[in-house]
Image: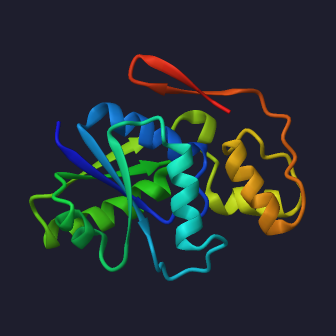
Amino acid sequence: MGRALYPGTFDPIHNGHIDIAVRASVLFDEIVMAIYDAPPKKLLFDTQERLELAMQALEHLPNLRIVTYTGLTVDCAREHKVDVIVRGLRNVADFEYEQQIGWANASLAPHIDLCCLFCNNDYAYLSATILKEVASLGGECGAWAPPHVLEALGHKFDRPIRSNAPKIYLRHGDKWVHRD
């Protein structure tokens, strides 16, 4: 079904992002996950760290590759010759924002479509901001990100991250993949 771009800052990648990437990998022949290199917001992880965390979290997806980019997302989409930009939606606010950006992108690149995937209900409340805040304050967030991401958060905040989370399974096509 073509090539799709899944852009974001992924600071850090969490299970909501992983869910969207896995589901998109079933819908499209290739997914190009694009990690924004210089967003206009303060980041906890630098670009190389975010790239490495994402690569480890998504290494089980053979049709996904990860790149970094600066500038307009639509220019990144053109550069990688994608047909579609994939975005994850948690709520109505996300929908309204993505609709607006989608219309702007359609004006700039009419041949690139937008595909919005609603997140799994288990992650409807989750954002990287919430994950970072709960982790920084010592809260239980083990069900929200893979262990290697929790470990990286622990290093950033100089404290162990509490995790009594059950094993997490993500759907990949007709299979369920265990995420340690």
- Kindly identify the residue that appears in the image at 49 percent across and 25 percent down: 171
- Give the side of residue 91 with respect to residue 74, left or right: right
**Front residue of 98 and 145:** 145
Q: Whole-percent x and y of residue 106?
A: 17, 65
Q: Compared with residue 178, is residue 17 higher up or lower down, i.e. above or below?
A: below
Front-most of 134 and 91? 134
Q: Residue at x 32, y 66 (%)?
A: 100
Question: Residue pushed farthest left?
Answer: 111
Residue 74 in sight:
yes
Query: Residue drawn 53% across and 71% down?
Result: 47
Q: Is residue 24 above or below residue 108?
A: above
The quarter holding residue 67 reads: bottom left
The quadrant of the rendering that contains the C terminus is top right
Most distant residue in the top direction = 174
Identify the residue at image location x=66%, y=43%. Answer: 146
Which quarter of the image is occupied by the N terminus? top left
Does residue 104 show up? no
Tell me which corner region of the image, top left, top right, bottom left or bottom right, holds residue 95.
bottom left
Where residue 152 sits: x, y (%)?
Answer: 73, 58
Residue 27 x %, y % = 28, 33
Q: Quadrant of residue 142?
A: top right
Give the answer, above or below, for where 90 lies relative to 109: above
